[in-house]
Image: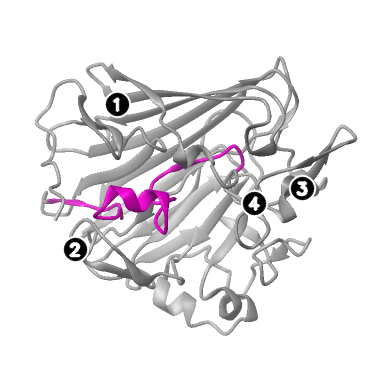
Amino acid sequence: MQPSPPPFAGGPPICRPDAEAGQRWTFGFPGGLTAELHTRGARLHGLWVPDRHGTPADVVLAPRDPARTSTTARYFGATVGRYANRIAHGRFTLDGRPYRLTTQDDGHCLHGGAEGFDARIWEAEAVHTPERTGVLLHLHSPDGDQGFPGNLDVTLSCLIGRNDELVLSYAAVTDAATPVNLTNHAYFNLEGEGAGDVLDHELAVDATHYTPVDEDLIPRGDHRPVHGGAFDLRRPTRIAEALARPDRQLAQTGGYDHNFVLRPHDGDTPRRCAVLHAPATGRSMEVLTTEPGLQVYTAGQFDGTVIGKSGTRYRAGAGIALETQHFPDSPNRPADPSPVLRPGEEYRSKTVLRFTTLG
């Protein structure tokens, strides 16, 4: 079994070289959050969070074998881009010019293509002040990367505060118009990685509409109201109860794997979009973001193939991903918020994971 680092004893972030992970960075504050981040894929590999008794546990799923991140577990905890989620058939037209992207086995472009940002080694440097600590990461994506136009330079800061917040701040600039949509693809289990499933967790999502999908998980073109249906998660709902709701979309995708349309938002201050709570441990995670959408994936396709850090096989519902992002396939959907970044502009996105304990 791959050893896990203990909760951080304090001081500046610690960097350890690793042939598979690139570099392993460990950072945090004593008695609070501790994170482990890998530079291959700017990947959140672990996050230790205290429970209601002050006992920390790692709440992020990751494979026992880091080599798995290039195969069946490639997106676990990774920063995905240049475009998170799906672009139908790997094609879009921008300013009258058609582009064709690399695609995966289903013929669509997922999370940036066959060799997206999750496969790259990011450059990293430590950030440490009395109130925050973490890593600043950089990546250059050249013109034509996976078929996308323009040279893109990306910066990601991953910082933990003394207030038990993990803050992910993304920035990017380009020399040619290009779609940009970055997110982190961590799976969470607030009872602890390897503790079982998340079916007893409670989930609330502050969204009035969601995006139905076809059999390939491509949007069908409409945003449907959640009111009174299987996708109405505006009040905290036990995940098992939500998944039991009769709905053709849930049956088709094996659970939630859908974009939720968040309430309109202006400005750079993240607003709360979701809350995940584990009654068994008291851990609660608020998700705040500047993004227009939230992809909720309840891991219904997990089949035990991936063995986790604790030696447990990850089966359906072992974790949940809450991916803040632009809407899927929006380069082909003019009615959706535009993901296009142009020269002279700066892409900015911020997501905050705020941890507390209840009862």
Q: How packed is label 3: few (under 14 Cα within 10 Å), some, or many (20 or more)?
A: some
The amino acid at mark 4 is: Thr
Q: Is residue 127 magenta?
A: no
Q: Indicate which disc residue 311 carries.
A: 2
Side (left or right) of 98 relative to 240: right
Which residue is nearer to you in this view: 335 or 355? 335
In this rendering, the label closer to the viewer, 1 or 2: 2
The amino acid at mark 3 is: Arg
Residue at 19% across, 63% down: 311
- State the separation of the CA atoms marked 4 and 2: 32 Å
Q: Position of residue 259 (x, y in %)?
A: 61, 57
- State the separation of the CA atoms marked 1 and 3: 37 Å
Quarter location, residue 147: top right
Check if mark 4's residue and mark 1's residue have beta carbons within 8 Å.
no
- State the separation of the CA atoms marked 1 and 2: 28 Å
Residue at 36% across, 62% down: 319
Quarter location, residue 346: top right
Q: Indicate which disc residue 103 carries.
A: 4
Span of residues in magenta: 56-83
Nearest to N terminus: mark 2 or mark 3: 3
- State the separation of the CA atoms marked 4 and 3: 9 Å
Nearest to N terminus: mark 4 or mark 3: 3
Which residue is nearer to you in this view: 175 or 294? 175
Q: How packed is label 2: few (under 14 Cα within 10 Å), some, or many (20 or more)?
A: some
Q: Indicate which disc residue 279 carries.
A: none
In this rendering, the label closer to the viewer, 4 or 1: 4
